[in-house]
Amino acid sequence: MAGLHLKKPRTLSPGSRVALVSPSWGGPGTIPHRFDMGVRELRERFGFEVVEMAHTRAEADWVWRNPEARADDINAAFADSTIDGIIASIGGDDSVRVLPFIDTNVMADNPKVFMGFSDTTTLHVLALLSGLQTFYGPSVMAGIAENGGMFPYTEEWLRRTIMSTRAPGDIEPAPEWTCEMVRWEDQSRANRRRTMQPNQGRKWLQGTGRVEGHLVGGCLDVLEMLKGTQWWPEPDIWDGAVFYWETSEDGMPPATVGYILRNYGMLGVFDRIVGMAVGRPDAYTTEQRAALPEVVRHIIADEFGRPDLPVVMDLDFGHTYPQITLPNGGRIVLDPQADKVTLPDPATV
């Protein structure tokens, strides 16, 4: 398959109406001041008109017990012609329970910006299967809300993707990054930046040839929840794709990542994709960070015979901060010899 033919959403701009939904954990009802930090950024930094859907701030236990109501909010936001974009409030661990209640016809017929990461992966896959390009990027409470204010790098990449009709272009590493855990309940830290560390940049694990393909993937932990269901991407979705993935704050051990990647190999994914882009892992020890590349290389090159497959690691997406925003289903170019990772197409229209 030479790329996917997906509908792209309209560009957001100051004054755009953006709906906030809670497809996973009921974070806004649990830590409302953190959610309010993100709402304030959307209003003041970007000039969006924020629309909270009916159950966005519902109590967390109620949200967990009512996946259909969560889906109702998403369906309503897509169906409402006055709403220009939709952003997930936060991730979680059970958005897969929402999928049976999503009206994919409404989603496909009303393309608009849909953004989030982590557990929102399930909805990105659903949108991909429905013919809609979405955005693997910051959520309201994680990435948009940030101690000391939104990171400039995160803001820049949000603007280059969902607020521009120009191609985002080359992805340059953030100058520094953090995975410091600060409890959101601690309001005394709300205005103090987390401890940062220098960014050593991306690492090319293997491969030398320039490749381009459409982005398929998300959070590796969450993609596991789709295997064996009707929402797992069919083989032709993987044809010519660049598989992008990252791991959650649970800190999946490198050996477990290897088990999962081995399963992808047995599913034939490595025979179909043209490249792999890996986000910097969160919650890893120094030893785990050193071990992960060898685990990935061993599975892909040694076990499944693809030492030619370009693999780039430690990109700035996922559960470390700041983050880029990736167009799920959009085209990406990996060029190991030139040390370039590029988004060559406008992400919105």
Image: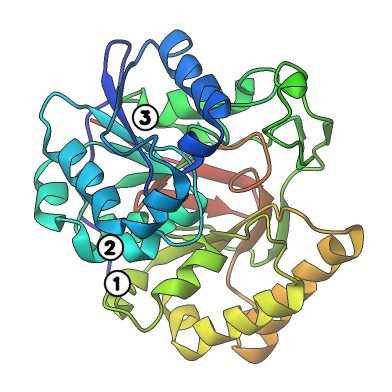
Residue labelled with disc 2: 99
**Quarter-wise, where is residue 135 in the image?**
top left
Horizontal arrangement in the rendering, residue 107 relative to residue 87 (left or right): left
Foreground label between 1 and 3 = 1
Q: Which mark is residue 162?
A: 3
Foreground label between 1 and 2 = 2
Which quadrant does the C terminus fall into?
Answer: top left
Horizontal arrangement in the rendering, residue 159 relative to residue 236 (left or right): right
Which quadrant does the N terminus fall into?
Answer: bottom left
Horizontal arrangement in the rendering, residue 35 relative to residue 8 (left or right): right
**Residue sitting at 35 percent across and 36 percent down?**
56
Nearer-N-terminus badge (1/3):
3
Front one among 218 and 103:
103
- Can residue 128 be seen here? The reply is yes
| Residues marked 1 and 2 touching at CB (< 8 Å) | yes
**Residue sitting at 50 percent across and 79 percent down?**
270
Q: Is residue 318 above or below residue 40?
A: below
Label 2 to label 3: alpha-carbon separation: 24 Å
| Residues marked 1 and 3 touching at CB (< 8 Å) | no
Q: Secondary structure at mark 2?
A: helix
Foreground label between 2 and 3 = 2
Neighbourhood count class around disc 2 (C-alpha, 10 Å): few under 14, some 14–19, many 20 upward: some
Kind of residue sitting beneath label 1: Trp
Front one among 204 and 99:
99
Pinpoint residue 314: horizontal percent, then vertical percent.
70, 52
Nearer-N-terminus badge (2/3):
2
**Residue sitting at 45 percent across and 52 percent down?**
61
**Residue sitting at 47 percent across and 56 percent down?**
119
Label 1 to label 2: alpha-carbon separation: 8 Å
